[in-house]
Amino acid sequence: MFLSSNPQLNKHGELHHLLSIEGLPAAILWQILDTAQSFVGVTQREVKKVPLLRGKVIFNLFFEPSTRTRTTFEIAAKRLSADVINLAVNLSSQSKGESVLDTVANLAAMQADMFIVRHGQSGAPYLIARHVGEDIHVVNAGDGRHAHPTQGLLDVFTIRHYKKDFRALRVAIVGDILHSRVARSQIHALTTLGVPELRVIGPKTLLPSNVDNLGVHVYHDMAKGLKDVDVVMMLRLQNERMEGSFLPSPQEFFKFYGLTADKLALAKPDAIVLHPGPMNRGVEIDSDVADGNQSVILPQVTFGIAIRMAVMSILAGN
Amino acid sequence: MKIHIKNGRLIDPASATDARQDVFIAAGKIVAIGAPPPGYHANRTLDAGGLVVCPGLVDLAVRLREPGFEYMATLESEMFAAAAGGVTSLACPPDTDPPLDEPGLVEMLKFRARNLNQAHVYPVGALTVGLKGTHLTEMAELTDAGCVAFSHADAPLTDTQLLLRALQYAATFDFPVWLRPQDAGLARGGVAHDGQVATRLGLAAIPACAETVALSAILLLARETGARIHLCRLSSAEGMDMVRQAKHLGLKVSCDIAIHHAHLSEMDIGYFDPNCNLTPPLRSQRDRDALRAALADGTADALCSDHAPVDDDAKQLPFGEAETGATGVELLLPLTLKWAEESRLPLAQGLARITSDPARVLGINAGRLTPGASADICIFDPERYWKVEAQALKSQGKNTPFTGIEVKGRVRYTLVEGQIVFESA
Amino acid sequence: MTNPSLPDAEALLASLAAQMRAHVTAQTGLVGIVTGGAWLAERLHRELKLEVPHGSLDVSFYRDDFQHKGLKRKVTPSAIPFEVEGRDLILVDDVLYTGRTIRAAMNELFDYGRPASIRLAALVDRGGRELPIAAQFVGTMLALPARYNIELKRDTQGRLSLVLQQP
C-alpha cells in the first residue's frame, strides 16, 4: 500500500540508504563485509585514515542518547576524512518545538551528505529517508525495536572472521528478543547469509509472537538451546525498555538465561561468544565468560569501526 | 423545490427494490416513485441515466472535530466532505474537547450543524463525564438534547462495576450503548496488531485478545442488564465469532466494521506507513477475511467510515508517535461497492450496509426511499473510476492509506431534505 | 580496420626482470597494484629472488574518481608485509596510462610510512599521461586509440597474456 519498492535501494539496485538488513540481497551484504575487510587493514596501519570521504559532511543525529555507537560512527567517519557534526537532540525540547522532519530539513539545508540516525521509535529513519533530497544518504544507527543494521553486520563480520563458513554453523541468540533491534538485524543477516540453524532462547514474555516466521527455532530451555552451537550471541537485558511485568527480577533471569561457564560448556568447545554491549555483568553474562578466551566481545568493537567505514563508503559512492 | 430524478437505477435495499424508476420530490419529501403525482411539474430535472439512485448514506462514525479540534478540521469542511461522499445522516462520536457530556454542548453542535444545511447530525453522547470512566452522565438530559446513543469512544473504561451500572442505567430508559471492545490493559502501549508484521517491524503490539476479552465482558454484562448494545469497529475473526454466537442466543446486540478493516490488513503497514496507524489496529489477513464474511452474512450490521481527519503535523511522525485514524467519509461509498463486488454480492446488499442497516442501528427514519420519507438521496455513477488524491479530498484530513489508489463509484448528487447539497460533473 | 597486434606478456615480463635485475637489493620492497600489477609483482619477486616479501595495493580508497564511479564491487585488502619507512620501493602495474592510478598508489604508500624512494615498473606504457608520472622500467611502449583498453589476463596455469577490449 505504501512504497512498493525497497526504499533502501536506488533504481540501479545499489544501496542508497541503510535502514534495515531485511530486504537487502545477499550480494550487498557480502560487498559490505568484503569492503570492511579492507578497512580492517587500514585500522591496523600507522595512518588510520583514507581520503575517500574528504569534503563530505556527516551528521550524527541521535534522538536517543548513546555514547558508544555515536563515537564509533564518529571515528569511522573521521577515518574516511569526512567532517562530522554531532547532534544530540534533546527529547524534552523536541516535544516543545521541532518535529523530526523539521530538524532534518534544517540540517539538509546545511549541505549534509549523510545522516546517521538513532531514534527511539521504530521506523523513524524511514520517515527521514522519505523526506531528504536524493543526494543525501541515511544510515540507521538503531530505531526503536526494529533494526540496528551496522550492529548486525559487524556481528556477522566477527563470526566470519572466526568461523569462516556460515553454511556450517549453528547460532543461538539469547535474551530479550522482543525489545531488541540488534536481534532482529542479526536474524536477518544470518538467514540471508545462509546459516542453516538459527535459534532464539528466552522466556515467553521476551519472545515476540510469530518469531518463527523470521526463520528461527524457539527454545525456552537454555541448556537445550545451547547444545552444540558454534556461536552464542547474548543480548543486553534492556532495563530501560522494560515497563511492567516482563520479568520478576534480573536475578531470576540470570539463573535461567544468563551465560555462565557451565552453560557455555554445553556449546561446542570452540564456540565463540558475542555481545553488542554494554554488558550487564551478572545479569545476562558472567564476568568470567565475558573476559574468557571464547569471548570475542572486544574484537566486535574494532570490527564495528571497519563495518561502519565500509557502509559509509559504499553509500557515498553510489 | 420540485425535483424530478429520471432514468436512474433505483436501489432501495429496505424495500428490496432494484429497478429503473423515477423519483419525484416536493417540499423536501419524496412524493412519488415510478409515476409522477397528478399535476406535478418539476422545477429541476436530474438525468440519472447510467447512475444509481439510492437512499442517502448513513454513516455511524464521522468525527467532525468540533468542539475542540478545529486545527484538525472544522464542521464546515467535514460536513461538506460528508456531502461529497453521499452521506445524508451521520452519527458523531463524543470524543470532542470537551467531550459531549453536557446538553449545552450537544445543542450547540446540533444547532451549528443544522445551520449548515447538509447531512443530519446525530450526536452520540458520552457515557461518563469527561469520558473519564468514573461518573455517569445525565443520559436522559442528553437524550432530550438530541443524543441517539451513549458511547465511550476510544477512552478506556476499566471499572467493570461502573460499566455494569452504566448498562443498567441505560437499560432503564432503553438508551442504546455503543462500545468499542478494547481491554485497556492488554492494549496498553500497543500501536499495531500482535502478529508477524509487528514482530518484524519492532512495533509495540496489541493482541486480538484485547478485543475478545473486552467483548466477553461487554456481552456478559449486556445479557445481565438487558441493555441494547452496539459494538463499534470490530477487528478480529474471534471477535466476530463471539458476536455471531451472541446474536444466536438472542442478545440485543449489533456491530459495525470500519471500511479500512474491510480491505486492509497488517501487511499494508509496509514501510511504517503512519496512515495505517488505526484504532483498532489492522489485523491479519485472516481477520480481514472473517470481517468481510461477517458483513456478507449480516453478523456485522453496518460498514462505517470511522472518519478521523488528522492534520499533517500529527501524522507525518514515526509510526508509533503518529496520531491514530484515517479520513474516510468520502471513501465510504466506493469502498463499500468494492467489498460487495469482490464478495460477489448484489449491489443492493452492499448498499444495505451503509443505508437501511445503519439507519436501523441508529433507530432513525432514514436509509430508505419511500413516498413520504425525507428526500435524502445519493445519486452515484457505479462505473466511474477515480484516483484517491489526498489534496483533492474535501475533508481537511488528508490522511488516508488509499492515496494513489483507484476506486470505483463516484457521487454525482447528494440531496438532503430535497435540497442538492453536493453535485459534481 | 584491423586490431593492432599485442605483444607477448611473458616476453615483456622477462624484459622487465632483465631491466630491474641490476637495480634491486636485498632490502627492495616490491609492491604490485591489484590485480594485474599484483600478479606481475608475484612473478618478478620469484624471478628476481627478492628477500623482502612482496606487497599488494588496492588503491580503491585513494582514487580520484570516487565521486563518479563509487567503490568497485570487490575491494581487496591492501597488504604491505614490510616496513615502508626508509625503504626503496618499486611499484608494479600492468598498464600505465593516465598516471592517476599511480598517483593514488603513491598516496596510499605514504600513509604506511615515508619511503626512501619509489620507482615504477610497467609492463605496457601506452602514453596518454594526464599527470607528470613516468616509469623507470617499461616492458614496451604501445600507442593505442583512446577507445581501446588493454588488460592483463592470467590463465589457470599462471601464464600471462594481454588482451584488447573495445569499449
Image (cartoon, coloured by chain):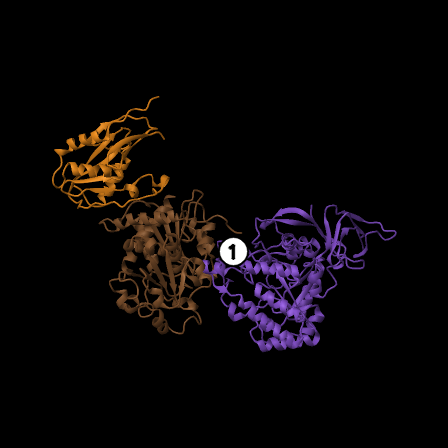
Residue B242 location (% of width, % of height): 60, 68
> Chain B: what color?
purple
Q: Secondary structure at mark 1?
A: helix
Q: Which chain shows up in orange? A: C
Q: Is residue C163 visible?
A: yes
The three-letter code of the residue at mark 1 reads Met
Would you say A261 lies left or right of B155 here?
left
**Residue A73 in sight from this viewpoint:** no
Q: Quadrant of residue A259?
A: bottom left
Residue B156 locus on image (x, y percent): 56, 70
| Front one among C111 and A9 | A9
Task: Locate residue A286: give its quadrant.
Answer: bottom left
Location of residue B71 by image quarter? bottom right
What chain does mark 1 sit on? Answer: B
Extreme residue toward the right, this view: B39
- Comparing B166 with B383, the one in front is B383
Between C112 and B252, which is closer to the camera in this rendering? B252
Is the residue C157 above or below the residue A185 in the image? above
Q: Quadrant of the C terminus of chain A?
A: top left
Where does the image place residue C127, in percent across and percent down from the top left? 27, 28
Residue A309: where, in percent of width, then height?
A: 32, 50
Residue at coordinates 35% horizontally, 54% vertically from top-left? A153
Give the colour chain A carries in the figure: brown
Residue at 50%, 50% in the rendered image = A3
The residue singled out by tag 1 in the image is B267
